[in-house]
Image (tube, coloured by chain):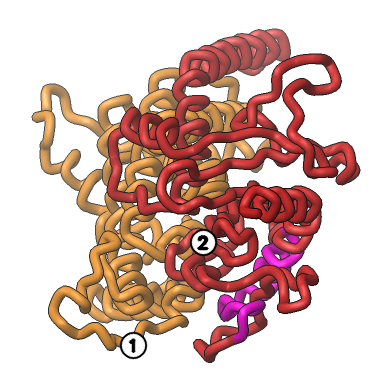
Chain colours: A orange, B red
Amino acid sequence: MSTETLEHKEAVLVKEKPSEGLLSKRRKKFISDPLVDDNPISIQVLGICSALAVTVKMEPTLTMAIAVTAVIVFSNLIISLIRDFIPNRIRIIVQLAIVAALVTLVSEILKAYYYDMFKVLGAYVGLIITNCIVMGRLEAFAMANKPYDSVLDGLGSGFGYAWIILVVAFFRELLGSGSIFDFKIFQAIGWSSFPTNGLMVDSIGAFMILGILIWIQRTKTGHVEAH
Amino acid sequence: MRQSNTYILIFAAGLTIIVGGLLSTASVVLKPLQDKQVELDTKKKILSAVMEVSSIKDPDEILRVYSENISSYVVDFQGNVIEKDAKGMDVVAEKINVAKNSKLPKEDRMYPVFQAISGDKAYIFPMYGQGLWDWISGFIALEGDLNTVKGITFDHKTETPGLGARITDVEIQKRYVGKRIYDQSGALKSIDMVKGEKGLPLDDHHVDGMSGATMTGKGVNAMLRKYLESYGNFISKTKQGSKVASL
C-alpha cells in the first residue's frame, strides 16, 4: 500500500499559470518533448514490441501509428476527466479497462471499414493494450493533470511513437521490399534488379534500424542512460 | 471516502456497466458492416483465384462481377450434388463454414464448389488448415482438366508478418500457377512447398518455399493435400462425366 501511494506521487504535476494561451510555451513542450528529448521509443525504450512487429511496410505502420495515437489521446483525456473520482487502490485496473475498451473500439472500427488492413495488422491492434506507452502516460501524466494538457501530452507521445516507427518502416520497406507504400520505387526508376534484403523483412532488420536511429539521436543530443 | 471499500465496489461496478454497454453497442451497430466486409472478402478471394480483381475498388462492382462469373453448388464426399442439409434447409455454397466443416469426419463434410461459368472453365475449391500460429485458409482454382492449377489464394489469421504471412502475397501465389496435382498415372501428388527459398526451377508438383516460414509452408502443404484428397471423388466423377459428354 505504501509503495503504491509513493509511486502515484511520482506523477508530475506541472504548475499552471492562470489564463495562459492554448499553445503556451509550457504546453508546446508537452508535444515537442516526446518527439526527440523524451521520445517514448528511443529514450524511454517503450513500445518496442509493436515497433518491431508492424514496421515491415509503411501502410500498416501508418494505420498502427494513427491507432496508437488515438488510443493514447483518448485514454489520457478520459482518465484525466475522471482522475478525481478514481479510487487510488484500483486505479491501474481502471486505466486498463479504459485502454482495453478503446482498443477494442479501434479494432471493431477497423474490421468494419478497413477490413484488409484489419487482416494485415491482426493481433497487433489488440496488443496496443499492452503498449507500455499508453499506460505509462496515464500513470505519469493524466492521473495528475488537466484534460486539455493531457490531450496535448497524448498527442506528443503519439507523434513521438509515430515518427520513429514510420522511419523504421520506411527503411524496412525500401530495402526489404524495394517499395514505399507498396509503390515499387526501384522498378519505377528503371532499376528492376535491385537486390531486396531479406534481413529487413525479418524483425532483426527493425532492431538494426532502431539501433542505428537511437545511436544517431544520442550522438546528437548527448543523452546518456542514468545508472 | 474515496478509499472506502463501498466506494471502490460501486465505482468498479459503474465502470464495468458503462464500458460494457459501450462495447456491446459498438459491436451490434458495426456487425452488419463487418458481415458485409467478410462476404465481400470471400467473394473477392474466390474471384481472384481465377481472375485479376485487385483493380476493382467498388464493392458493388465486385458483387456484380461475382454473380456474373461464378456459379456455385455443394457436393458431398462421394461427389454428388446436395441441395438440402440434414435438417432439410437449402444449402448455399458461399454460406458454408469451411472452418467448422473441417472438424467433421471427411465423409460428413459439405464441400462447396465454385465454378467459373464465363470464359475458360475452372473449378474453385475452398481449403482450411493450420499454419504455425493459427488457422490458414485458401481457394484453389483448377483448369477445366481438373489437374492444372489456374490460380490459388491464401489467407491466414496471424502468421508471422513478413515470414509466414507472405502466403497472401501475389508473388508467392503465382508460383502455383501451371503446376499439376495428379501425376502421369493419375495418382494424386498434390503440390508441396519446399523448405528454403532458392528460386530454382522445380517440377510440376513442387513450388519454391518461403525463407523463414517452413512451418507455415508445411501447414499449406497439409491443407492442400487434405482438400485435394477430399474433393477426389468429385474430381473423378466430373472427369468421367465430361468424357461421356464428349463421346
| Residue ID at (27%, 32%) | A149
Q: Which residue is mark 2?
A: B150
Which label is found at residue A195? 1
User: What percent of the width, then of the height, locates residue B233?
Assistant: 80, 51
Q: Residues within 10 Å of mark 2 (few under 14, many from 20)?
A: many
Q: Residues within 10 Å of mark 1 (few under 14, many from 20)?
A: few
| Residue ID at (66%, 77%) | B205
Q: Quadrant of residue A178?
A: bottom left
Position of A158 with respect to B232 (left or right) is left
The span picked out in magenta is: B203-223
User: What percent of the width, then of the height, locates residue A227?
Assistant: 50, 73
Position of B48 with respect to B20 (left or right) is left
- Can residue A52 be found in the magenta stretch? no
| Residue ID at (83%, 16%) | B87
Q: Quadrant of residue A182?
A: bottom left
Q: Is residue A80 above or below residue B70?
A: above
Amino acid type assigned to the residue bearing label 2 in the image: Lys
Amino acid type assigned to the residue bearing label 1 in the image: Pro
- Can residue B209 be found in the magenta stretch? yes
Q: Is residue B231 above or below residue B193?
A: above
